[in-house]
Image (spheres, rainbow, N blue to C red):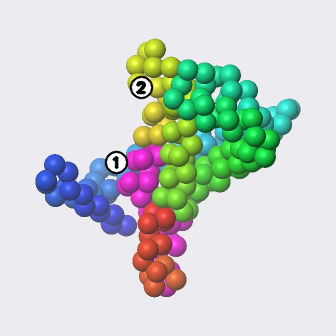
Amino acid sequence: MTTNAQVEMLGQQIEFNYNEGLTGYVLVLVRLLTGYWFLHAGVTKYLAAEPFNAAGWMVGATQGTLVHGLLAWVAGVPILMELTNFMIPLGEVLIGLGILVGALTRLAAFFGGFLMVFFYLGNADFAHGFVNGDLFGLMLFAIIGTLALGRIYGVDAIIEKTEFVRQRPALRYILG
């Protein structure tokens, strides 16, 4: 397996080889842990004694944050609240599963990052600075998507070799 990435940073072309040393293994570990984290979060919502309901967090815990108005509005519209309560656990399971097995990795990382933006802005009181666990989660999804970590020991490495994907190179933007 040879996996190289070329990026331009500050006007310099840099080649990054996943095969050097332990880099590839560490990146796979990052992908596996992040996938497990989100899969576990979604599954435990389904297995909880009470049905998942985000309304309390959206209305109460987000007061004083940048997204409180939007989240409180969503919580006040019954159909949007039902959709939110359905989509968060389902999204966490699908995102976690995709990241864990390395399938549709960039798509899963995008939606994982999307959720983490809301979690970060909704949980951020910034009393202890701008850095918190939600920001680190957002960065993990950015790393996974940017480096296309599904191509390293993931299902995307197999999918990208198919004739279907070779004939549709745009699919590589959601794979990887």
Q: Is residue 36 left or right of residue 160?
A: right
Q: Picture coordinates of residue 157 (x, y %)?
A: 47, 68
Tell me: residue 127, above or below residue 112: above
* Residue 152 falls within the magenta-colored stretch: yes
What numbered label is drawn on residue 22? 1
User: Which picture quadrant has residue 176?
Assistant: bottom left
Q: Main secondary structure of the magenta part?
A: helix
Residue for point 61% across, 43% down: 38
Pick the residue in front: 2 or 72.
Answer: 72
Question: Tag 2: residue type?
Answer: Val
Whether residue 36 appears in magenta in the rendering, the answer is no
Q: Is residue 147 left or right of residue 4?
A: right
Is residue 100 at least partly visible in the picture? no
In this view, the residue farthest toward the top is 127
Which residue is at a point 44% across and 74% down the rendered structure image? 170
Q: Is residue 173 visible?
A: yes
Q: Earlier in the sequence, mark 1 or mark 2?
A: 1
Which residue does the image show at 13% across and 54% down from the upper left?
Answer: 12
In the rendered image, the vertical position of residue 97 relative to residue 162, given as above or below:
above
Query: Which residue appears at 51% of the width and 39% of the height?
Result: 117
Point out the image quarter for the N terminus: bottom left
Q: Position of residue 70 (x, y in %)?
A: 61, 36
From the image, state whether disc 1 or disc 2 is nearer to you: 2
Q: Secondary structure at mark 2?
A: loop
- Residue at the extreme right of the image, as rendered: 49
114 relative position to 94: left or right: left
Residue 48 placement (x, y as % from top left): 81, 34
Q: For mark 2, what is the residue?
A: 131
Magenta stretch bounds: 140-163
Looking at the picture, does residue 21 appear above or below residue 61? below
Separation (CA) of disc 1 from disc 2: 28 Å
